[in-house]
Amino acid sequence: EEFETEIPDEDAEKITTVQQAIDYITERRRQA
């Protein structure tokens, strides 16, 4: 919510580190 990004459950299961979460959010924002 803080980043205005929804992470689907199947993607969230793959995120195990803070860096992976940052990378995911960064990539999603580029695509938007």
Image (cartoon, rainbow, N blue to C red):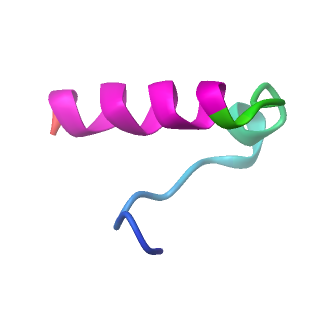
Where residue 11 appears, as percent x and y from the top left, is 68, 33
Which of the 4 image quadrants contains residue 21? top right
Q: Which stretch appears magenta? A: 19-31
Q: Nearer the viewer, residue 21 or 6?
A: 21
Where residue 25 appears, as percent x and y from the top left, is 42, 39
Whether residue 28 sits left or right of residue 21 in the image: it is left
Residue sitting at the far bottom: 1
Q: Residue at x 84, y 30 (%)?
A: 16
Q: Residue at x 68, y 37 (%)?
A: 18
Relative to residue 25, is residue 4 depicted above or below?
A: below
Relative to residue 29, is residue 17 depicted above or below?
A: above
Q: Nearer the viewer, residue 24 or 32?
A: 24
Whether residue 10 sits left or right of residue 7 in the image: it is right
Where residue 32 appears, as percent x and y from the top left, is 15, 40
Where residue 12 appears, as percent x and y from the top left, is 73, 41
Whether residue 14 sits left or right of residue 19 in the image: it is right
Q: Residue at x 43, y 73 (%)?
A: 2
Q: Nearer the viewer, residue 4 or 10?
A: 4
Whether the magenta-drawn stretch holds residue 32 is answered as no
Whether the magenta-drawn stretch holds residue 25 is answered as yes
The majority secondary structure of the magenta stretch comes to helix
- Number of on-image labels: 0
